[in-house]
Amino acid sequence: MGERRLKRSWGAVLLGMAAALTGCAPDVGGTQQTPEQTDAQTLAACSYTITTNTYVGADYWGTIAFKNTGTAAMTSPTIAFGVPSGVVCDYDEPGWTHTQSGATCTYSRTSALSIAVNASYTFYYSTSSSSSFTASNVTISDPSCGGTPPPTGTGLSANQKKVAEDLTSIWENDTPNIDYAYSENIQDGRGYTNGRAGFCTGTGDAIMVIQCYVNLRSAANGNLMAKYMPGLTTINNRFLSTGESQASTAELDSVGNWRADWATSYNNTTTRADFKSCQDQVSDQLYYTPAMNEATKWGLTQALSKAALYDAFINHGESGVKSMIRSTNTALGNSGQVAPVIGYNGITENAWLQKFLEKRRDVLAGDSTWIDAVDRVAAYEKLRRKGNWDLGTAFRNDVRARDCWGTTYPSSGYTVRAINPDGTWSTPTSYTYACQ
């Protein structure tokens, strides 16, 4: 099928997280040392170098870039800094939340974020100030530098996650086999779409995979993708500055055959493990972990609900999923977005998942390009109606949106597969489309 995740409606979904690891900025100062500490977690100041510290008043936009110069990867950093008196920090990039005490703004993660040793990360923030300034007393702390990591949402079991990944892989590649070697320009305005989760060169996530890969393996050690980092950085900078997906692949095509090199990086038995590991890591960072944390926040405990959220994160991104969650809660009488929602005014997980799938169906069906992928929602609706909450019963994706909600929906044409509770699968010789 080659149906890839929907990013068009949320062009800036990954502006914060996708800026991770872009690097390339020169060092402009030494390791920062301040007494600022985060009270909510026992964190220790890390070793790092600030490479960019700007706030452009005309744009109400601040940038802090830093390099991890410590001996361990950061796993969930907290960034604190001072702003001029009277200035209010007023915006959270996806994956971040903030508090403010006086003139100190403290940003912490709402989901895991890994910043490898010697890797760089670019953090963005906004304030009420129309005057330019330089943030003062920048402090970066992290559990890996001391203390206890913050708790994250309870995830799926190994078998449940494999089943969830099988389903998403059907929608992404028309097979439950995860296609790490996939690379194609599907002419959707996002450059090359690649790998297990459709990482795109024009939307800030493919560069995260390649930077991870560069950290594990050099060009001299067989990394065919290392040579693309300058071009990727140029494309990523345009994406970050405009908030718009980047269709151009010219900066990559002038260097080599991106598609062939991506495929070879996985197909070569020498480099496969590293390349696969980076795809898995970025997929978990951007999609799986945030999905599990959202499930925990809203009180969702069933594997089916978590699998549906996971697929939605890959399909729509964090901002898109949160928008659908808000719409779901409001439709069920929770306009105040009280969390957890399960149990609030009698709302059940069954009712919540039903409404969430309907909201997601409407999002897909309302897009002229992505309506062709609407059947991916129907599979979760069929599992809900059959009560397969723990994904512990074998099932088939022999269901279309029209089977659940009427004939106005087109058929997506996904190949029907039979999936077992341990994630193994087969292709049935016969089946009947139905939503029950």
Image (spheres, helix red, strand yellow):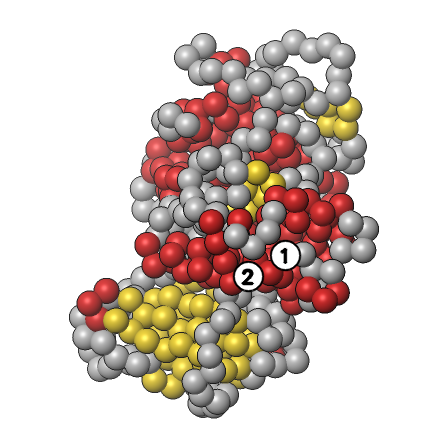
Residue 25 drawn at (x, y percent):
46, 74
Q: Is residue 218 rendered to the left or right of residue 103?
A: right
Say above or below: 190 vs 417: below
- Give the SS element for disc 2: helix
On screen, 279 above or below 107? above
Classify residue 259 as left or right of residue 187.
right
Q: Name the residue under label 2.
A: 229
Residue 30, image x, y percentages: 48, 89
Q: Residue at horizontal 53%, vertical 20%? A: 412
Question: Are the two marked residues, 2 and 1, in contact with CB atoms closer than 8 angstroms?
Answer: yes
Looking at this view, is 160 or 400 the one in front? 400
The residue depicted at 40 percent of the width and 24 percent of the height is 365
Quarter of the figure with residue 355: top left
- Split into 4 quadrants, where in the image is the C terminus? top right
Q: Residues within 10 Å of mark 1 (few under 14, many from 20)?
A: many
Q: Which residue is found at the position 19% from the left and 67% from the top?
A: 58
Q: Name the residue under label 1.
A: 225
- Seen as rendered, the residue at the extreme right is 269
Q: How crowded is mark 2: few (under 14 residues within 10 Å), some or many (20 or more)?
A: some
- Specify the amino acid type for callout 1: Met
